[in-house]
Image (spheres, helix red, strand yellow):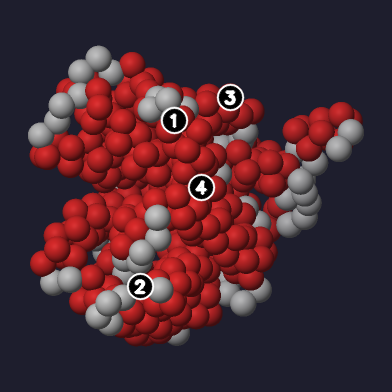
Amino acid sequence: MSTAELRSVLDGDGGRFIYLSAALAALNGLLFGFDTGIISGAFLYIQDTFAMSPLIEGVVVSGAMAGAALGAAVGGRLADRIGRRRLILLGAGVFFVGSLTMAVAPSVPVLVAGRLIDGVAIGFASIVGPLYISEIAPPRIRGALTSLNQLMVTVGILVSYFVNFAFADAGAWRWMLGAGMVPAVVLAIGMLKMPESPRWLLEQGRTDEARAVLARTRSEGVDEELAEIRTTVEKQSGTGLRDLLQPWMRPALLVGLGLAVFQQITGINAVIYYAPTILESTGFGSVTSILATVGIGVINVGMTVVAIALIDRVGRRALLLVGIGGMVLTLGVLGFVFYVPGFGGALGWIATASLMAFVAFFAIGLGPVFWLLISEIYPLATRGSAMGLVTVANWGANLAVSLAFPILTANVGRPSTFWLFGLCSLVGLVFVYRFVPETKGRTLEAIEDDLRQNISLAD
Ligand code: BGC
């Protein structure tokens, strides 16, 4: 790209500026993925520096998830109050402080504090990344653009594996944890140049600014979209929180909360966080296990790219149904393989292939589609708060599964644990079939209209 072309994109030439804004905002996803993935490697070496009780170990590892739940609880309201863009800037600052605190921590309490601060930023990022992108995107490509955020989550996880690998010989855990400062700075600097969400601006009565942002991010249809958003704003009944409790909101809350929980209780993070342990038990050596784990990370990224290519064409429901259906099958196979006595050899390879297929099916369905749908189905006035509520449920379920997985495998065994995830996936499949709406190609305002008129979202 020539300098003149780059300048025209930066200045906003309607069509292409939108891609730049979405890509930058998707750095929220990168930080989310990187900061959740990095701890598994760093933790091995932190133990050499500090003596920790098992309880404190648990807090160091899962502290970020608890922090994320807190961040999501506060972040949703903040997104509605201070705006999407300012929350991204604030979040980048919190990421920076959290990573710095962990990197220089002289003691365990400071390390735990850093991990919690970092978690709060992860909570902010998990909401505001998809929220911001879905509100600036034109309906035709909203699915693909918003899912860039999930793509960057998967890239962040993969990068964290490599960073862990790079610093492993030196045992340099401070560098591993401190590395998160780099994307935080890029995000902060980049966002200074990016516009606020036109929908939030209009909601604040800042019509001229909203029009300017639409003009900068659309090549056509600016006036129509502005009029549509304005009509929606006029229908608002009052404060966002009150809306959240209205009976007409229930179908949307059910969909969001259901997907939030199913995204986690079907076991993705048991695989993402414990892949090396699971793989070693299939008879692989540690190096092969680590390589296979990287393979899982690559598949996660690759299949998210496939999802992005399909999401605005085949729609959200089709991807969810195929993805969860595949998860049911692969989990069934995994349980069976682990069940067979004297497991190893060829079965070890089948287990590995099934683990990879399981991640592929997650990446094409529940991974991106959950975050996309929850940024689409809530009314403007309460969108941040509603996403906050649903995201808290997602982090809560994530924490519960991560803590329960080692306990479950120790007590009921690995086959039953995987079958339990499989059963949850089966219920999830029925749930999606029955309740989840198709939002492909529609404006956010049209989706909200259906909700207000009590048209069941799934019809
Ligand atoms: C989930 C995370 C998960 C990641 C894996 C995200 O959508 O919310 O819990 O670790 O996908 O790619």
Q: Nearer the viewer, residue 178 or 243?
A: 178
Residue at (50, 64) in percent of width and height: 363
The answer to whether residue 267 shows anywhere in this view is yes
Q: Nearer the viewer, mark 4 or mark 1?
A: 1
Q: Position of residue 79 (x, y in %)?
A: 40, 40
Mark toward the start of the polypeptide (2 vs 1): 1
The answer to whether residue 255 shows anywhere in this view is no
- Amino acid type assigned to the residue bearing label 4 in the image: Leu
The answer to whether the beta carbon of the residue marked 2 is less than 8 Å from any atom of ligand 1 is: no
Q: Nearer the viewer, residue 290 or 333?
A: 290
Mark toward the start of the polypeptide (4 vs 2): 4
Considering the numbered disc 4 on the image, is that residue within a helix, a strand or a loop?
Answer: helix
Mark toward the start of the polypeptide (2 vs 3): 3
Residue 189 is marked as 3
User: Does 403 appear above or below 325?
Assistant: above
Q: Position of residue 132 (x, y in %)?
A: 52, 46
Q: Which residue is mark 4?
A: 158
Q: CA distance from mark 3 to mark 4?
A: 24 Å
Q: Is residue 247 left or right of residue 100?
A: left
Q: Nearer the viewer, mark 2 or mark 1?
A: 2
Considering the numbered disc 1 on the image, is that residue within a helix, a strand or a loop?
Answer: loop
User: Does 61 appear above or below 350?
Assistant: above
Mark 3 is surrounded, within 10 Å at the Cα level, by few (under 14), some (14 to 19) or many (20 or more) other residues, namely some
Considering the numbered disc 3 on the image, is that residue within a helix, a strand or a loop?
Answer: helix
Q: Which residue is mark 2?
A: 344
Q: Nearer the viewer, residue 248 or 250?
A: 250
Q: Nearer the viewer, mark 2 or mark 3?
A: 2
Q: CA distance from mark 3 to mark 1?
A: 33 Å
Tag count:
4
Q: Nearer the viewer, mark 3 or mark 4?
A: 4
What is the quadrant of the C terminus in the image? bottom left
Residue 169 is marked as 1
